[in-house]
Image: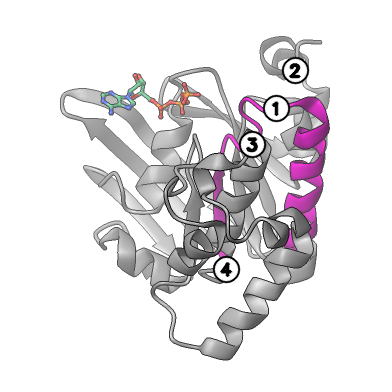
């Protein structure tokens, strides 16, 4: 479904990705794990068109996307939930969700998806008239995920969904990620510091170090890998 081939991405003179290659098949949950500054967020931002790779190729469903603008990438079926959520704090919960469906015209489909996100996160239905900025951190994460789902993505990119949340909420968020994958057949590309929980719900995983992919294995194999255990799982 998604393929990155030798992707090199920069911020000015700083090279963040040094030839990243990876593949994601339809229906999979894939984790990308690595230390701070390894290039995880840059990988996601290169896929969704916020960062333009200086060289290399990114293709989605066989179509080259690395030169497309971000809004066109959304219409092809890729949505991102950015690190730090970035909801619209002054808009209501409902208005935030409407923004997620901004590029769609199928009213019936939008209504179905709104019902679906409210079934996943009933608290958002209860708070639909409240300003997004008044929600708790966990509720804002739910809103950011729901806003992305309102674009009806085939591929959902999640950047650190557990960051700053209480353990009980983190578990709930990971359970829902798995549920979205199973119920909607949404393919998931997950970036996480919380490598243990991410790998537990993933099919496969990649390790990124200093802009290079250094390991690609089934999630269960990565969890058994002594180097991964030591560096990322705290075992
Ligand atoms: P973290 O978990 O801390 O978010 P990460 O693995 O997601 O880390 P990136 O944010 O992709 O890493 O950063 C990769 C490299 O690019 C780092 O060296 C970082 O300092 C640099 N970088 C990231 N964003 C910028 C930016 N806006 N300007 C300059 N350098 C940046």
Q: Residues within 10 Å of mark 1 (few under 14, many from 20)?
A: many
Q: Can you identify the residue that label 4 sits on?
A: 154
Q: Which type of secondary structure does the marked residue at label 4 adopt?
A: loop
State which mark lies toward you, 1 or 3: 3
Dot label at residue 195 = 1
State which mark lies toward you, 4 or 3: 3
Closer to the chain start, of discs 1 and 3, is 3
Q: Position of residue 10 (x, y in %)?
A: 24, 32
Q: Quadrant of ligand 1?
A: top left
Closer to the chain start, of discs 3 and 2, is 3
Q: Spatial distance from mark 3 to mark 2, Cα to Cα?
A: 28 Å
Q: Position of residue 63 (x, y in %)?
A: 38, 70
Q: Can you identify the residue that label 3 sits on?
A: 136
State which mark lies toward you, 3 or 2: 3
Q: Which type of secondary structure does the marked residue at label 1 adopt?
A: helix
Q: Spatial distance from mark 1 to mark 4, Cα to Cα?
A: 24 Å
Q: Position of residue 185 (x, y in %)?
A: 71, 68
Please report the residue visible at 30 percent of the width from the left and 37 percent of the height from the top: 8
Q: Spatial distance from mark 1 to mark 3, Cα to Cα?
A: 24 Å
Closer to the chain start, of discs 4 and 3, is 3
Q: Which type of secondary structure does the marked residue at label 2 adopt?
A: helix
* Residues drawn in magenta: 155-181
Q: Can you identify the residue that label 2 sits on?
A: 233
Mark 1 and mark 2 residues within 8 Å of each other at the beta carbon? yes
Q: Nearer the viewer, residue 134 or 96?
A: 134
Q: Which type of secondary structure does the marked residue at label 3 adopt?
A: loop
Is the CB of the residue bearing disc 4 within 8 angstroms of ligand 1? no
Please report the residue visible at 73 percent of the width from the left and 10 percent of the height from the top: 230
- Relative side of 72 to 188, left or right: left
């Amino acid at each position: 479904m998604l393929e990155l081939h030798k992707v090199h991405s920069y911020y000015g003179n700083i090279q963040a990705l040094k030839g990243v290659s990876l593949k994601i098949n339809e229906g999979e949950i894939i984790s990308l794990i690595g230390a701070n500054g390894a290039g995880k967020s840059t990988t996601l931002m290169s896929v969704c068109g916020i960062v333009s790779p200086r060289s290399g190729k990114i293709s989605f469903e066989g179509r080259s996307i690395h030169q497309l603008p971000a809004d066109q990438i959304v219409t092809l079926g890729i949505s991102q939930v950015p690190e730090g959520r970035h909801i619209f704090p002054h808009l209501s919960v409902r208005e935030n969700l409407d923004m997620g469906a901004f590029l769609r015209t199928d009213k019936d489909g939008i209504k179905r998806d709104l019902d679906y996100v409210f079934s996943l996160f009933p608290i958002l239905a209860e708070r639909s008239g409240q300003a997004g900025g008044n929600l708790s951190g966990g509720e804002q994460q739910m809103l950011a995920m729901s806003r992305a789902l309102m674009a009806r993505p085939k591929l959902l990119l999640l950047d650190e969904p557990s960051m700053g949340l209480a353990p009980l909420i983190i578990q709930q968020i990971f359970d829902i990620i798995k549920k979205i994958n199973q119920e909607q057949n949404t393919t998931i590309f997950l970036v996480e510091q919380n490598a243990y929980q991410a790998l537990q719900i993933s099919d496969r995983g990649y390790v990124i170090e200093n802009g290079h992919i250094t390991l690609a294995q089934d999630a269960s194999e990565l969890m058994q890998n002594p180097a991964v255990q030591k560096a990322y799982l705290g075992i």
